[in-house]
Image (cartoon, helix red, strand yellow):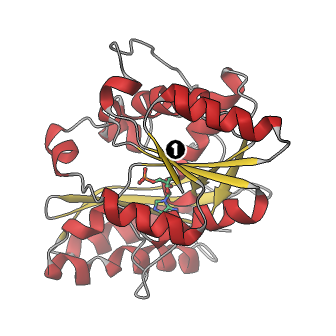
Amino acid sequence: MEILKTINDAQEYVLNQRRNGLKIGFVPTMGALHQGHISLVEKSTTQNDITIVSIFVNPTQFNNAADLEKYPRTIDADCKMLEAAGCNMVFTPDEKEMYPQKDERVFSFNGLESCLEGEFRPGHFNGVAQIVSKLFFAIPAHNAYFGQKDFQQLAVIKQLVLQLDIPVNIIPCPTIRESDGLAMSSRNLRLTPEHRSNSTFIYKMLQKTVELAKANNPTLIKEIIISEFNKNKLLKLEYFDIVDNTYLQQTDFFQKDTIYIACVAVWAGDVRLIDNIQIN
Ligand code: AMP
């Protein structure tokens, strides 16, 4: 497995493989890898000849300096996991390489970027669009893999690719969970044991939402689930919403032929966790 640090080297590597007629899969990450990331890598290895993973903790998508500083960095363990999973090249640029000068670009995605996560993390998706567009330039892949755990990010990236005419297929991948249901996340490493065991509550509430949706409208479901969260002393709910999976609009009633997603953000101590589930 090769480890490359500059955009020039990475581009040259990819273009060489493409000249040889090989299909390239790309998995962008911020490192501190777990089985969720590895599932994306494994999917890429089954669909492509060459799989590339980037590891870069992108400062422009953090709206909270402490969160950026505390973000776990485990590069040696990450590389071992990637090699075992069949990754061919890891791109690990530093900040100067990705941002030789301040990125002043401001993206707009018809409101996709300002609801849900966007409301509580202003500028987050602009930072995501900045780095992902740069990474797609450095790694001109055929296919790029993103987790449905970050389903709003997925919606934003699909729009980004359309707006900028980037010739890459965006492949969504299912959320991988711990055996007790907690969605895997690099941030889970920072949970206290008490918060860790309590965090299974999040997935239980998402499953309850699916059950309730069989006979109730979204407004009532929201009331019930929010009041359940408010009874939980260890988790602080930031939002719980039910939206359609394309425009991420809230709804008062379920329409046939539309896919709805229940999505949630909570604070478990000083760790922010997000999760979602498809309702129908
Ligand atoms: P991150 O390193 O958190 O930026 O995540 C890199 C990629 O891995 C993103 O496309 C995430 O959606 C995806 N990912 C993170 N956690 C999971 C998970 N539990 N299951 C599936 N994909 C995930």
| In the foreground, 254 or 89 | 89
| Left or right relative to 52: residue 272 | left
Look at the picture and state if 206 lies above or below 68: below
- Quadrant of residue 234 in the image? bottom left
**Label 1 within 8 A of ligand 1 by Cβ:** yes
Look at the picture and state if 91 lies above or below 197: above
Residue visible at 73% across and 23% down in the picture: 165
- Quadrant of residue 20 in the image? top right
Q: Position of residue 29 (x, y in %)?
A: 46, 50
| Left or right relative to 24: residue 195 | left
Q: Position of residue 78 (x, y in %)?
A: 39, 62
- Residue closest to the far bottom: 179
- Quadrant of residue 235 in the image? bottom left
Look at the picture and state if 233 lies above or below 276: below
Report crowding for label 1: few under 14, some 14 to 19, many 20 or more residues within 10 A (C-alpha). many
Residue type (three-letter) at the residue carrying disc 1: Gln
The reply to whether residue 206 is in sight is: yes
Label 1 belongs to which residue? Answer: 153
The reply to whether residue 252 is in sight is: no
| Left or right relative to 93: residue 194 | left
| In the foreground, 253 or 191 | 191
| Left or right relative to 132: residue 124 | left
Q: Secondary structure at mark 1?
A: helix
Residue visible at 33% across and 34% down in the picture: 94
Q: Quadrant of the N terminus?
A: bottom right
- Residue closest to the far right: 21
Residue visible at 70% across and 57% down in the picture: 259
Q: Position of residue 25 (x, y in %)?
A: 68, 50
Q: Quadrant of the C terminus?
A: bottom right
How many marks the image carries: the answer is 1
